[in-house]
Structures are given as structure tokens and as C-alpha cells.
Amino acid sequence: MKAGREKFGAFIRREREAKEIGLREMAKKIGVSPTYLSKVERDEFPPPAEDKVRKIAGIIGQDADELLALAGRVASELTDIIRERPREMADFLRAAKGLTADDMARLARQAQRAKEK
Amino acid sequence: MKAGREKFGAFIRREREAKEIGLREMAKKIGVSPTYLSKVERDEFPPPAEDKVRKIAGIIGQDADELLALAGRVASELTDIIRERPREMADFLRAAKGLTADDMARLARQAQRAKEK
DNA sequence: TCGTCTGTTTAGGTTGCACTTTACACGCGA
DNA sequence: TCGCGTGTAAAGTGCAACCTAAACAGACGA
């Protein structure tokens, strides 16, 4: 499911419990202490660093970009792409702000086609 | 002019001197200490925070997004836009990676048109 | 040669992020 | 009631980002 306005911590706790994974087990897989994960899951600490969020996404079976967004982050891979063409990318993003998912998907396909050419 | 592989500090120093602005004067306009600006301009310190970079861009007459990129950053305004539609934006950016400026400009225009509709 | 520019050196400092360690309290099955 | 597994509370660590104040050195004009 999607995560409307839910906080990062609450969301991953729900998903973790749904998958019947223990907190310690998950903490170990992510590579953090159980204590820390506990606080994160209760939104007492902010979401962890990008690589940890990615691991969490893998474990609970969520899209990494989506979970990163919920964590208030953007994949560094994406900001790297923007930095290669700052002006054009900035123009595009400002123009694309507020577009529907469908419109965006269409633009992504066009970009793909432009590259294949 | 554009800033091929030049470092952030060296670049803004050149532009500042070209505009015949003193280091102290510029520091004051930006809102930092002259000491700090001196170090930044010699790339002894990393580029300052986003708002400072924006002010510098205004003073030396450069595109803010371009200068932010040179500073190794992306405008937080843009990452906000991405976070509103993480999956689609991520797909788009990965597809758009490596496209020419022309191709990007065309996509930006299409986005603009999609929004006006 | 004094005052006043220029930028620079030295030597910090604060704040916040991203975590850890240690200890604890509860429930539950054997 | 032992001990094990669950999650939690309190405190502290390490480090990088972002920045400062004070003092100084060289050039230049009065």
C-alpha cells in the first residue's frame, strides 16, 4: 500500500510487523542497533541515512524511491543526474511540478525514446 | 561564462574580482565573515549553505541552479518537487540521464504544455 | 610613517546528524 | 521462577557542516 501522510517510522513498523520480523532481527539486517531502530520506528529519531533506508525498503518490499521520499530524502543518484545539467533539469522540474502521474510517465517514456535515438 | 571543471571557490573569486567587489564587501552582502569567504574562495573550506550560494549567484550574476551544482548541491526546492512524485520523477530522471541540453529543453517545454492544459 | 585599504593566518567554536552502549521492564512458555 | 525474547529509556560518542574573532602582513596614498 501507499503511505499517504503517515510518518516514516510508523509506516516501517507496520510493515515490519506485517512481515513478522522482530525489531532486533531487522536492526541486524540493516546494520543498526535495535535501540536506534526502536526510536526511529516511533518517530522519536529522524529516518536514518540513505543506505539504511534502502535496506529497509528491500526488507519490507517497498519501492526505494518512495520510501526515501517518505524519509524526506532523494536518492543521491538522482541529484547527481541533476547536477550534470542543472539549468535544464531545474527548468524541467519546475515545469513538471504538480503534473499527474500519467503525465510524468508519458514524459519519462519520451525521455527514454530520445535517448535510444 | 560557464565553469567547466573549475572549483567553486576559484570560480567565484574570479567573478568577484571581475566585478571589482572587495572580499569584505561581498562577505557582508552574503552575511558571512570575511575570513570564511576567504577560505571558501581558495577552496580551503567547502562551499557554504544553499542560501549563501544563492546570494553569491545574485551578486556575481550567475544562474543559481548552475552555481549550486558547482557547489555540489541541488536546490531544496527541486528535491521537494521530486518528493511529491518519487517514483515517476525517479523514472524520468534515470531515463533523462545523459540527454543533451536540447533534448532536455524540449522535454521541459512539453511538461509546460501538459500543465497548461 | 601613519593610517587605511587589501586579503590571509591561526585558532578556534557551535550545531546537528547519525548513530551506540548499557541497562531495564515486561510477557510467556518450560 | 527461571530465563528468554520482546521492545524501550537514558545518556553519550564521533564527526562533518558551517561558521567566527582576533590578529597580522603587504600595498598605497596623504
Image (cartoon, coloured by chain):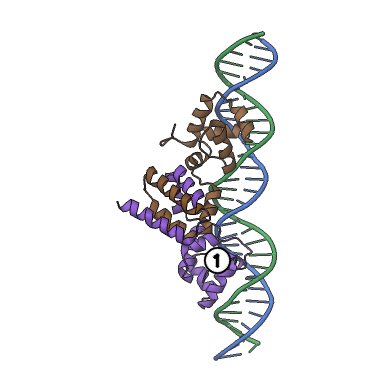
Chain colours: A purple, B brown, C blue, D green
* x then y, percent, for residue A55: 47, 65
- The three-letter amino acid code for the residue at tag 1 is Ser
Report the side of B86 relative to A36 (left or right).
Answer: left
Task: Determine which quarter of the picture holds residue A43.
Answer: bottom right
Residue B48: image quadrant is top right
Tell me where residue D22 sits by quadrant. Answer: top right
- Report in which chain the residue with disc 1 lies: A
Classed neighbour count for the residue bearing mark 1: other residues with Cα under 10 Å, few (<14), some (14–19), many (≥20): few
Please say if A114 is above or below B48: below
Q: Which residue is mark 1?
A: A33
Q: Residue at x 51, y 25 (%)?
A: B18
Along the viewing direction, whichever of A116 and A32 lies nearer the viewer: A116
Q: Is residue B44 left or right of residue C16?
A: left
Q: Nearer the viewer, residue A104 or B63?
A: A104
**Position of B59 compared to C13: left or right?**
left
State whether residue B73 is above or below residue A113. Answer: above
Residue for point 39% across, 50% down: B97
Look at 53% across and 73% down and name the residue there.
A15
Looking at the image, residue B74 lies above or below residue D12: above
Residue projecting furthest to the left = A117
Q: Position of residue C29 (x, y in %)?
A: 56, 90
Residue A53: % across, % down: 50, 62
Quick one: SS at disc 1? loop
Q: At 48% from the left edge and 42% from the top edge, which residue is drawn?
A: B69
Residue B4 or residue B97, whichever sits in front? B97
- Say whether residue B51 is visible: yes
Q: Position of residue B35 (x, y in %)?
A: 60, 32
